């Protein structure tokens, strides 16, 4: 009965998805600016008032534009490991990473990431997403094999949507202090971002967060510096833009 109505240009109360990007209008300049920042800083904290379009800007603007080649990076393919913190941020990060990096077992990702804050970089480098042209596998592959390896390689975007859930859920934040699990996630992500920039690896970290929570961010060591380094404030759309 609803066969003709599968894609609706009005999303109601929910955010725009990547598939709905062709209906996403009024943000062209914002997308361009945000992409520029993400390209050079490899980190972006997207803030703005509640409901002003942060998640939509990332899902229907930044991601499809990156895939279309407007964010210049090492590979042509992109994988996006996105998650919301909810009440289990570490588990959610690991699940999303294991899917996008093609690591079958989420438990493996969980134990690896507990080894040290730089462990996510190693996971990426050892995954099919990273094309190592010095490796024996690459050198020994025939043209067909090389094409397969190339097809699997991809830039990695890690997206934490609704970052404020690190503060709104008591499992993640209690008496003004983040939980151990929350600290682990932040330490891993910020260290990943630092190394990605230092070694020029195609890894990009994006957070979306309601700006009311900006003050609380100082509870995480190093986070305020990253926000100062690369923040994009999503302005409210005026009537014509909408
Ligand atoms: N460019 C746009 N044009 C029209 N509607 C939009 C646009 N961007 C977002 N919206 C709509 O505005 C509402 C809020 O968008 P979205 O969920 O992206 O905002 P948000 O800032 O992430 O919200 P929250 O603070 O709850 O996380 C949704 O209904 C979405 O469909
Ligand atoms: Mg949102």
Image (cartoon, grey):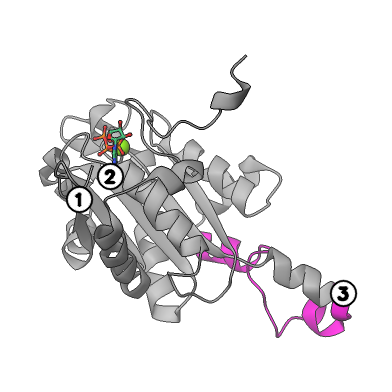
| Magenta residue span | 117-144
Q: Position of residue 136 (x, y in %)?
A: 80, 81
Circle 3 packing at 10 Å, graded few (<14), some (14-19), many (20+), is few
Sequence-first tag of 3 and 1: 3
Mark 1 beta carbon near ligand 1 (under 8 Å): yes
* Relative vertical location of residue 23 with respect to residue 2 in this rendering, above or below: below
**Tag 1 and tag 2, C-beta contact below 8 Å:** yes
Secondary element at tag 2: helix
Cα–Cα span, label 2 and label 3: 42 Å
The residue at the far top in this view is 1
**Residue pointed to by mark 1:** 234
Sequence-first tag of 1 and 2: 2
- Ligand 2's quadrant is top left
Q: Position of residue 43 (x, y in %)?
A: 33, 63
Image point (23%, 64%), residue name: 230
Q: Is residue 141 visible?
A: no
- Determine if the magenta segment contains residue 130: yes
Sequence-first tag of 2 and 3: 2
* Relative vertical location of residue 65 with respect to residue 236 in this rendering, above or below: below
Circle 1 packing at 10 Å, graded few (<14), some (14-19), many (20+), is many
Mark 2 beta carbon near ligand 1 (under 8 Å): yes
Secondary element at tag 1: loop
- Determine if the magenta segment contains residue 188: no
Quadrant of the image occupied by residue 147? bottom right
Query: Which image quarter is the C terminus in?
Result: top left
What number of labels is visible?
3
């Amino acid at each position: 009965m609803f066969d003709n109505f599968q894609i609706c240009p009005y999303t109601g109360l929910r955010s725009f998805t990547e598939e709905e990007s062709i209906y996403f209008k009024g943000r062209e300049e914002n997308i361009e600016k945000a992409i520029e920042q993400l390209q050079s800083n490899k980190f972006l904290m997207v803030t703005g008032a509640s409901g002003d379009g942060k998640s939509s800007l990332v899902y229907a603007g930044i991601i499809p534009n990156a895939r279309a080649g407007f964010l210049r990076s090492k590979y042509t393919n992109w994988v996006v490991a996105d998650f919301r913190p909810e009440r289990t941020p570490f588990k959610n990060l690991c699940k999303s990473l294991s899917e996008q990096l093609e690591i079958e077992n989420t438990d493996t990702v969980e134990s690896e990431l507990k080894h040290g804050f730089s462990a996510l970089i190693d996971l990426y480098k050892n995954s099919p997403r990273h094309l190592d042209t010095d490796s024996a596998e690459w050198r020994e592959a025939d043209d067909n094999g090389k094409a397969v390896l190339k097809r699997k390689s991809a830039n990695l975007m890690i997206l934490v949507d609704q970052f404020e859930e690190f503060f709104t859920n008591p499992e993640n934040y209690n008496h003004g202090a983040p939980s151990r699990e929350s600290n682990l996630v932040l330490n891993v992500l910020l260290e990943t971002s630092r190394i990605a920039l230092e070694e020029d690896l195609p890894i990009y970290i994006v957070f979306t967060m309601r700006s009311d929570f900006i003050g609380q961010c100082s509870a995480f060591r190093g986070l305020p510096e990253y926000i100062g380094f690369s923040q994009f404030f999503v302005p409210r759309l005026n009537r014509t833009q909408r």
